[in-house]
Image (tube, rainbow, N blue to C red):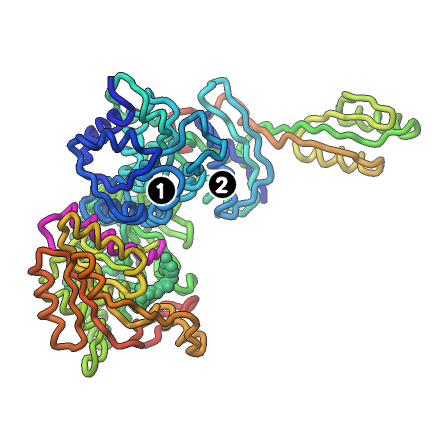
Amino acid sequence: MLTGGQILIECLKEEGVDTIFGYPGGAVLPIYDALYDADIRHILTRHEQGAAHAADGYARATGRVGVCLATSGPGATNLVTGIANAYMDSVPLVALTGQVPTGLLGKDSFQEADITGITMPITKHNYLVKDVADLPQIIKNAFHIAQTGRPGPVLIDLPRDVTASQAEYRKAKAPNLRSYKPVMAGARSQILKAVKLIAKAQRPVIYAGGGVVNSGGHEELRQLAEMLMAPVTTTLMGLGAFPGDHPLSLGMLGMHGARYANYAVYESDLLIAVGVRFDDRVTGKIESFAPEAKIIHIDIDAAEIGKNVPVDVPITGDVKTVLKQILKELKAHPNEAWKEKIEVWKKEYPLEYDTNNGLRPQAVIREIYHATKGKARVTTEVGQNQMWAAQYYTVTRPRSFITSGGLGTMGFGFPAAIGVQVGCPDEVVFDIAGDGSIQMNIQELATAVTYELPVNVAILNNGYLGMVRQWQELFYNRRYSYTELHNPDFVKIAEAYGAEGIRVENKADIRPALDQAIASSKPVLIDFIIEREENVMPMVPPGEAINKMLG
Amino acid sequence: MKSTLSVLVENHPGVLARVAGLFSRRGFNIDSLAVSTTDNPTISRMTIVVDGDEAVVEQVAKQLRKLVCVTKVLDITNEPHVERELVLIKVNADAQARGEIMQIADIFRAKIVDVGRRTLIIEVTGDKGKIDAIETALKPYGIKEMVRTGQIALVRGSRTAIINSKED
Ligand SMILES: Cc1ncc(C[n+]2csc(CCOP(=O)(O)OP(=O)(O)O)c2C)c(N)n1
Ligand SMILES: [Mg+2]
């Protein structure tokens, strides 16, 4: 006989889980008791939100399911932002929450929160386990749901009497979900239609997103691009789906995309949309997004196809599988003239910034790129720091640019970096942060120090909630309402936690600081005092057409 | 435009909340929703009448299909099908009006299921057109209370919703 808690651990091991991120409390005592001598690594964060983001970062970097654990009530509600974040960015996550004993459910008991109700709209699915006998099959199904089809978070709520009770452990059978069957292959008729359209196109553009990364279809994407000589632009979530240093790469498109990326989309006659969802930050004014193009849209989630724009050839299926199907039917079809036109745009409208005076955030990011030889795993916070990172850190491989795209969660980057470092212990990890965002989960410095995780944090310190200030400057007549920050001494904070802190105020000191951080075996926080009112440019004003850019 | 979706779902707790939540969250308009178990006790059927253009209804169907507890979604609007709704109408009926009301009930093949001192309760089944018509006919007498079950529907002929397939 085992306790429910012990059965849970057996089931997690059965799913190949080696690490969970969590925080204890009364309702999960039976689980923590089982963890005490289990051969699963438990990382104690300092806030449940940190645990959820760390599990998220771990999942995005490794491609495996991230697992987080919290107690009932406030523990569970503290996970909510992290779960919503994983949901918006399609990250496979299993969130385990303690719950009051089944007999006390629905009675407003101490630390009771209806977490399955609360997370219904932000999980792919969730469960409340009422009988320990159901536990193995629920865990099996939950992991299956989280990582197949369009990935997403699944929450399992575990009443304390369920994890405390004794039962015989019976291994679960294969997932038994008759109503859940993701389609992998695209319909052949649609593949042929797509191939026909591609053969006719003269100005094709590939618009690639996080779905490419999730499916592992980046190699197939490269082949497709090279066969057509088609430029590839990616979304924020798609950075790394196509090598940023490839001659066909246009970098990111959309509100803060490169000018040439937006121009290419605007003038294309065929848009091959792969694992994307036509988000408003990408399309701008929707009617003028690729107005002359036919659209092929490939996505695992049928509901994304036709949601925001009408599509000529919809293909529902796993991106990698569908791209393989297309490649099999396709003949090389280089579009030389188009490629040349794009080369001209690239020369005429490069991404650029003022390199003359002051400490520029863009320069910091370029130096991080050089110092890490482009091989770091980068996470970001949210705001200007995030956009500069996306523009200036050339991402060359998938799963190495990890950012809160859909929800835009300040405070994501640092705990995510911790999860990334746990998943990739031998790699250099950088969180590119803002002075505002870092303070939303700065307590996780304790976690990084405790577990000797040598994550690096580069704070682009402008003394502002910079992105909001930028909008106030541009659209609210420079009325900086509550966006100026009076910050603590970040170097001292780092040191107080037992991490290293470095302050950089001059351009010349960027590289030495970075080299020191990379060489250090401790977590290092670098406080870059940057130009205070630097803006992210170019920019498509909200609601404007994507070829009408400022800056 | 109104469309009728026939939706098979797992008979689990919370399924109705998931479906209802989806409609409110995404701003879809439900005209009516009727749920009950089917001959298979593990499966329930929801008949949902949705108000929206073709694109909206397609989104509704796709979003419903994404729910792990939804087994099948069929848009039966343009298929030959039988649709019915049951309505109870409590109408003012003094001695004078009683005869006329009973005649109206007769015309609509409705039943009088309760006779009060000043009121009658009329039970009628039919499609939306018929229900609307009797409602209009009874209105002048003063409808005191009314309850409708919401529309239910089945496709005509031998076609059925097969339980273990998710596409239509
Ligand atoms: C949790 C949360 N609250 C508020 C916002 C709105 N917001 C978006 S960017 C931003 C400013 C971020 O400031 P900072 O971290 O200093 O980054 P900067 O833009 O200055 O680089 C704010 C407040 C958000 N995205 N997330
Ligand atoms: Mg800032």
Q: CA distance from mark 1 to mark 2?
A: 24 Å
The quarter of the image holding the N terminus of chain A is: top left
Number of marks in picture: 2
Q: Residue at x 78, y 30 (%)?
A: B90
Looking at the picture, does residue A290 appear above or below residue B136? below
Looking at the picture, does residue B105 appear above or below residue A375? above
Using the image as rendered, state which of residue A16 and residue A352 is in the foreground: A16
Q: Which of pointers 1 and 2 indicates the residue nearer the eye?
A: 1
Residue A467 image offset from top left, x and y in percent: 35, 68
Residue that label 2 marks: B21
Residue type beneath disc 2: Gly
Q: Is residue A326 left or right of residue A293?
A: left
Q: Residue at x 20, y 28 (%)?
A: A14
Quadrant of the image where one finds ligand 1? bottom left
Residue that label 1 marks: A75
* Residue numbers of the magenta segment: A407-428
Q: Residues within 10 Å of mark 1 (few under 14, many from 20)?
A: many
